[in-house]
Image (spheres, coloured by chain):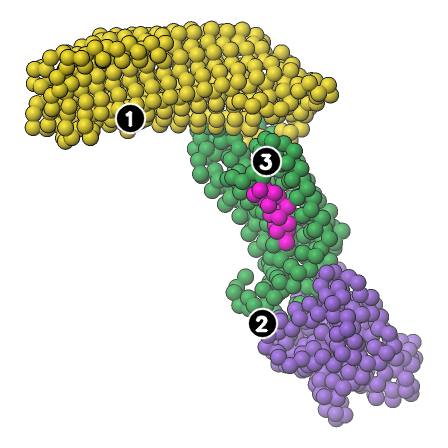
Amino acid sequence: MIGIEHLTKSFGKLTALNDICLELQKGQAVSLLGPNGSGKTTLIKSILGLVVPEKGTITVKEKVITKDWSYRSAIGYMPQIGRYPDNMTIAQVIALIKEIRPDHIRYDEELIEGFGLDKLKNKTMRSLSGGTRQKVSASLAFLFSPDIYILDEPTAGLDPVASELLKEKILKERTAGKLILITSHVLSDLEGIASHIVYLQDGNLVFYKTVEELQLTTGEVKLNKVIAQIMKGDVPLREPVRNIFSIQERQGKTS
Amino acid sequence: MYNRLILSAFFSVCAILAHAATRQVNPSAGLQQVLDKALPGDTIRIHPGNYRQSNIIVRKQLVIIGEGYPVFDGENKNEVFIIIADGVVLQGLQIQHTGRSSLVDMAGIKLQNVKNVRVTHCKLLNTTYGVYLQNSKRCIVSNNLIQASAKEELQSGNGVHAWKCEQLLISSNRMSGHRDGIYFEFVTRSAIIGNTSSGNIRYGLHFMFSHNDTYEYNTFQNNGAGVAVMYTRGVTMYKNTFYHNWGDASYGILLKDISDSKIDHNTFHTNTVGIYMEGSSRIHVTGNTFSNNGWAMRIQASCDGNLFEKNNFSGNSFDVATNGTMMLNTFRENYWDKYDGYDLDRDGTGDVPYYPVSVYSVITERIPVAMILYRSFLTRIMDQVENIMPSITPDQLKDIRPRIKKWQL
Amino acid sequence: MNGANTPQMKTIIKYVLVDLIRNRIILVYTAILAVLAVSVLGLDDNPAKGLLSLLNITLLFVPIITILFSTIYFFNAIEFTELLLSQPIKRQQVILSEYLALVSALSGAYIVGIGIPLLFLVSGTESLVLVATGTLLTLVFSSLALLVFVKSKDKTKGIGIAIIIALFFTVLFDGLLIAFIYSFSDYPIDKAVVGMIALNPIDLGRVLMLLQLDVAVLMGYSGALFKKFLGSPLGNVFSVTCMLLWVFVPLIAALRIFRNKDL
C-alpha cells in the first residue's frame, strides 16, 4: 500500500533519511522505532507530503504522491503534538475536518464517543489538557475510516483508560485489513499491536522484520525486551537489511 | 454708497415714466429704427424671438425691456448694444455671440461715457466682453447671467469690465468662463456685492488702481488664479467666499501694493494659497476663516504694519509661509488648530506663543520635492525638535496670545 | 490559487475566522483602535486634526502590529496547518485560506476600530481613504508576514525579521530618503523620489492621504511632477497600484515557496 524507494532527505548537513526503501502492505501494523533524530518523523512527514523528498519516490496505493494530493484521503494522521487554534471548540474542529471532506458522509465516531468528547464539545482547545487534545487528534485520524493510519506517538499523554481504548481501536482496524504505521516510545503500548518493526538509526534503515522473527532470533517474548536485546547489540542482526526483496519474500511466506 | 445710487436711479426713472409712451417691437421690425424714432423717456417692449440684429446704438434715454428673453445675436462678428445716452435701462434681453477683435473690445453691452444707466436681468452668452463700462458714473449692473467658455487668456475678454468709472454698483451677477470675471481699472467709490464669479481663466476679480471700493458677499471659486487686488488703497472686503482656487500661481486673494484696507469675515476654503500678500501695509485682517488651504497665508517680507487678529485657521497644510526672517506684522488672538499649547490660567488664550511657520514649510520652500515626505513620522519628529529649539523658522513671527477655542464667526 | 476546491477554502476561512474573532489580541487591538479613534475625534471639534492623528496612528501601529501578529499566528498554527495538510487538499489552498482569514480578521478589526467611529464622527472621502489606506497596509504587512513565515526556519528568527521589516519601513526608509533628497536637491530628482516612494508601502499609504489632505499645497509647487503626478487622479492610481503589488508580489512569492517548504 505504501511503497518507498530510495527515499533521501537532508536538512542542511544533517541527513534525515538516507536511501530508504520500504514496502508496507495492508493488514500490517508497522511500528516505526529508533532513537530521537533517527528520521522517524521525517519519514512520516514524507509520506504525508509535508516534507518534500530530495530523491526517491513514494507511492500510496500505487500512485506517486508528488503528482496528486488526493491520495491523502486514504490516510488518517494523528500528529505527535496536537495544537489547535486556541478559540476553536472541539465541535468546531471536528466540523471543520468533516467539511473539508465533503466526499464523506459516514463517519466513524467510535472514539469521539469512547473518549467522551461529545460531552466536552463546546470547550475551546485552549482550555483542554494535553491528553484531551490527543484524544481529539486520535478521533480525527479515525473519523473517515481510512485504509492507512499514520499515528505519531498516539498514546503519549493519554490516561491508561483512553490508551487502552485507542489500542483496541487500532487492533480492530488492523483486523479489518488496514495498514497501520505507528511510532511510539512506550514499547509496551505496541505489544500485541505491532506485526512488523521498522528500525531507523541516523536516517538509515537498520531492519524491517516481523515481530515473530525478532522474537525468534532474540529468544524474548516481550517487545521491550526484544528491542532492548537488539539495542545492546547482543543479537547478530547483520543480515543484509537493505535487501527489501528478501524481506518481501519472507512476508509472502508468512502472511 | 450704493443706496444713494439706487435712489437716484429710482427717481430718474420715475421722472421719465411720468410722460412716457410705450412701443412694442417684434422680430420682423428693426430695433435700431424703433429706437431712433422713439422719444427720450419712452419704453420699448421687445417681444420674444430671434433678432438677428447687432451694433444697436442707444442714443436716447430709453427704457428697453425684453419679454421672455428675446435673443440678439452678434453672429460672431459684431457688438450688440452700445449705450451712449445717460439714464438708459436695459432689461431682460438675451445677448449672444459677439465678434472677436484685437482692435476693438467687442462687448455684449457697452456703456460709453454715460451716467445712471442700468443693465439688469440680462443673459449674456458667449460674448467676448459681457458688460463693458467705459468712463461712466453711477451705473448699475445687476442680476445678469454672464457666461462664456473662453479657452485662452489672450483671445478672451472679461465678464464685467469697467475702466475709469465712478460709483458703480455691480451686484448679484453670475459670471463665468471669461478671462476675468470682473475687471476694475481706475474705478473708484464703487461696490461689488453678492456676485458669483467662477471658472474664469485668470481672475474671478481683477482690481487695479481702484481706490475706496467695497466688495462683499461675493463668491469666487475655481478661477485660474483666484482674485487679484493690486495697487489700491482703501479697499474693504467683507464676507466674501474664496473657494477652491488651485494652482501654482493661484490665490484666494493676491494682494499686491495694497494699503489701508480691511479684510473682514471672509472665508478662504481649499485654496492653494488663501491670501498672498506682497508690498502691502496697514491691512487689518480679522474674523476670517481659513480652512483646508495649502497655505492659509503667504506673507512676503515686503509687507509691514499689517494686523492679523481673531481669525480661525484650521485644516490648512501650512498656516503661514514667508520668504524672510524679519516680520513687521502682528498676529494676535487667532485660533490655530495646530497649536499644542496649554491654558493654565483659563483665560481662553494659550500661555505659550504659537509659531505659525512650520519647519516643514520652510524645508519644502527650499526643496519642493521633500513635500512627498510630509506628514511622515520623520517630519513630525522634525516639527517637535524645531518646537523645542527653533533654528530655521522665523522666531519673530508668532502669535503670543493664540486662542484655545475656535471663534464663532 | 486555482479555483478548485474553493468550498474547502471557504470552510477553512470560516473556522479560522471563528477562532480569530475570539482572539484576545484581535479584540484588544480593535478596542484600542476604537478608543483612540473616539477620543481623538471626539475631543477635538476639528475633524481635520483628528483625521491626521488617526493617520499617524495608522501609519505607525498598523504595520508593526499586523506583521508581528500575523507572523506569530502562522508559526503558532504550524501543527494545525500540518493537520489540515494531511487532509486531501492542496497545500497552497490551506495557507492561502489561513492568510485570507487572517487579513479578514485584522482588517475587520481596523475597520471596526477606526472606520465605524469615523463614519459617525467624520464621514467624507478623507475618512474613506484613511480606512482604505489602513486596510491596504494590513493586507501588505500580512503578505510580508506570510513571506517571513515561509522563509524562516524558526519562530524566533521570524519574529526578529518581522520587527526589522516593520521598523525599516516605518522609520529607517524615510530617513534614508530624506538624506537622499537633501544630498541631491540640486538635481532633478523628482522622478527618482516618486520611484523610491513606491518601494515603501507605508509611504504609499501616506501619499494616498496626502493627496486627500494636501492636494491644495501640492498644486502650489511649480514642479511639473507634483502637478502631473500628485495633483491628478494618476497619483491615486499609482499609489493604489503599487500597494496592491505590495500585497500580491509577496503573497504569490510566499505561496510558491510554501509549495515546496518542509514543515
Tell me, for residue B145, which label it has, or none.
Answer: 1
Residue B292 is situated, as x and y percent measured from the top left of the image, at 52, 28
- Asked which quadrant contains residue C8, the reply is bottom right
Identify residue for label 2: A67
| Relative height, residue B362 to residue A43 (above, below) | above
CA–CA distance in space, label 1 to label 3: 40 Å
Task: Spot the green chain and give its letter.
Answer: C
Task: Spot the yellow chain and give its letter.
Answer: B
| Relative height, residue A165 to residue C243 (above, below) | below
Residue C194 is situated, as x and y percent measured from the top left of the image, at 52, 35
| Relative height, residue B243 to residue C40 (above, below) | above
Q: Secondary structure at mark 1?
A: strand
What amino acid type should be assigned to the residue bearing mark 2? Lys
Q: Are marks 1 and 3 on the same chain?
A: no
What amino acid type should be assigned to the residue bearing mark 1? Leu
CA–CA distance in space, label 2 to label 1: 77 Å
- Asked which quadrant contains residue A17, the reply is bottom right
Tell me, for residue B290, which label it has, or none.
Answer: none
- Residues tagged 3 and 2 counted as in contact (Cβ below 8 A): no
Majority SS type along the magenta span:
helix
Identify residue for label 3: C51
